Amino acid sequence: MKFAHLADTHLGYRQFGLIEREKDFYEVFGKVIDKIIEENVDFVIHSGDLFESTKPSPMALLEFQKGLLKLKGAGIPMYAIAGSHDEAFHKGAIPPHVIFKKMGLKVISPINTNYMQGDIFIAGLPFYPASQINVLKSKLAELSKKAADHEKSILVLHQAINFDEAGHHELEMDDIPDNFNYYALGHIHRYIERDFGKGKLVYPGSSEVWKTDELNDYKINGKGFVVVDMDGQKPTVKRVAVDISRAFVQRSINFDSLDSNIAGLKETIKSFDKKPVLTLNVKNMDSDSASVYDTIKNELEDLSLIIRPTFSKREETIDEIIYKNESISAEQLIEEKLLGYGNSEVDELALKLYDLLSKDKIDESQEVLDQFFEKHYVSIDEEIEFTTENLQNDEDEEEEIVEEAPEEESNVQVTFKGGLE
C-alpha cells in the first residue's frame, strides 16, 4: 500500500499583497493533485496549513474543493490535520477542514485522533503552540500506546522539531514516540527526510515558495510532495517535484556595471511565460539610491511581477583613502582617525610614538611613554585617599564626556507594488 504525503499548501495566501501570487498557489496545488492521481496512490495525508488562515476566502475553499473532488473521483481518500495557520485557538473553534467532511475529507483532530486505512493505523494531532507542549506530549504518549497494537502505523503532526539547528521549534527529538513506521510532518517548509524509530520521518516542505528564504532549498529539492510505499520492512520514500508557477530571480549587481547588468537581466527574463519575482542586491553604491531605484524601475518594472531591491554602500579602505589623496602623509592619516576623541595630549602622544618607532628609536619611545604615564597616572606606590566626594566627582566628570556613538548606516530596502513579507 502506498500513499502521498504533502503539507503547507497555504491556499489563499496573497504573497506581497498580489492576487497573482494567490493564483500561483492555487495553480501549483492543482498540479500536485494531478500528480498524486498519476502516482496511483491508495490515500493522501496532508500535514497541516492546508489554508493560509482560519477563515479562508471563498476562492481558497473552492480551489480545495475542486482538488478534493478530483481525488474522490479517483477513489483516493484524504486525511488532514489543522496547522498553525488554519487552526483557531479560542475555545470552541473548529478548523475550516470540517466543511468538507461530508465530501469525504477525514479530519484528524483531538476528538478523532486516529483512523484505520486497511491494516495501517493512522493517528495524529493538530498544531499545538509551545505554551501547550506538555499537553501535546501527554497526547503523543497516548497515541504511542495505541500504535503498539498495530504492525504498521503513521503519526501525523504539524510541529517544528529541533534537529540541532538554529530556529524556533516546539519539540525535541526525544519528545517523539519511536514506535511508528512513518512520521508525516508539516510546518517546516523545506524538504527533510530522516531515519527515525521504526521507519522514516519526513517534512515534504511547502508546495510553493511561501517565503523567499525557501529558495535555496527549492533549488536543491524542488517543491512538491512524497510518495511512501508501506509494503516493505521499512517505508520507502520517493520525492515527486512539481514546478512552481513563477520564477524567482535573485541577482547581485555591482553599481559600477549597473547598466550592463540590467541589460543582461532583461534578456534573461523577457522570455519567461510569467513575470518573475525579482530580488536585486545593488552593491558598492556611491550614488543616491533614489536615482538607482528609478533606473531599475524604469528598465525592469514592465518585465517583473515585483522587484525587491536592496542597496549597500561602498566601504572605503585605507588604501582607497590614500588613493583619493596621494599627497596625504601618515601623520595626517593618524590625525584624521583620532578626530572626535577630544584629547589633544593623546593625539600628540600617538604622533610622537609614530615618529620615534618608525625610526626604530625604542628607548626614546619608552621614555616618552614613561613621562606620559607619570604625568597622567598616579604611581602604584603612592597612597591614595578615596572619599565618597571624590568618587562622585569622578563619576560626574566621566558622565560629562560620554558621547553617544553614531548609529551605523543600514541598507535601504525598497519594494515596488506591495509590502515586504
Image (cartoon, helix red, strand yellow):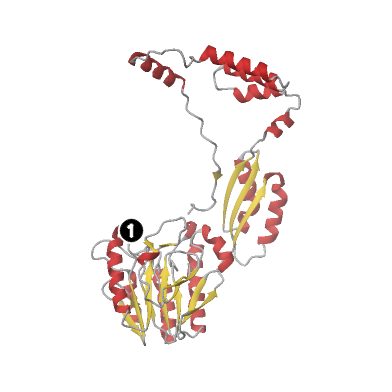
Q: Quadrant of residue 156?
A: bottom left
Nearest the viewer among 263 and 401 is 401
Instruction: Look at the numbered disc 1 and give the secondary structure of its residue.
Output: helix
Q: Is residue 305 above or below residue 69?
A: above
Rendered position, 402 above or below 144: above
Q: Which residue is mark 1?
A: 130
| Left or right of residue 8: residue 103 | left
- Which residue is depicted at the point 41% across and 81% down? 69
Q: Is residue 167 left or right of residue 284?
A: left
Specify the amino acid type for callout 1: Ala
Residue at the image point whose x is 54% and y is 50% from the top: 415
| Residue 115 shows in the view | yes
Q: At 69% across and 47% down in the image, what residue appears?
A: 258
Give 411 or 191, whichever is nearer the viewer: 191
Where is 174 relative to 35, above or below?
A: above
- Residue 344 in view here: no
Could you say which is closer to the camera, residue 301 or residue 232?
A: 232
Q: Is residue 289 above or below residue 252?
A: above
Q: Position of residue 337 (x, y in %)?
A: 62, 25
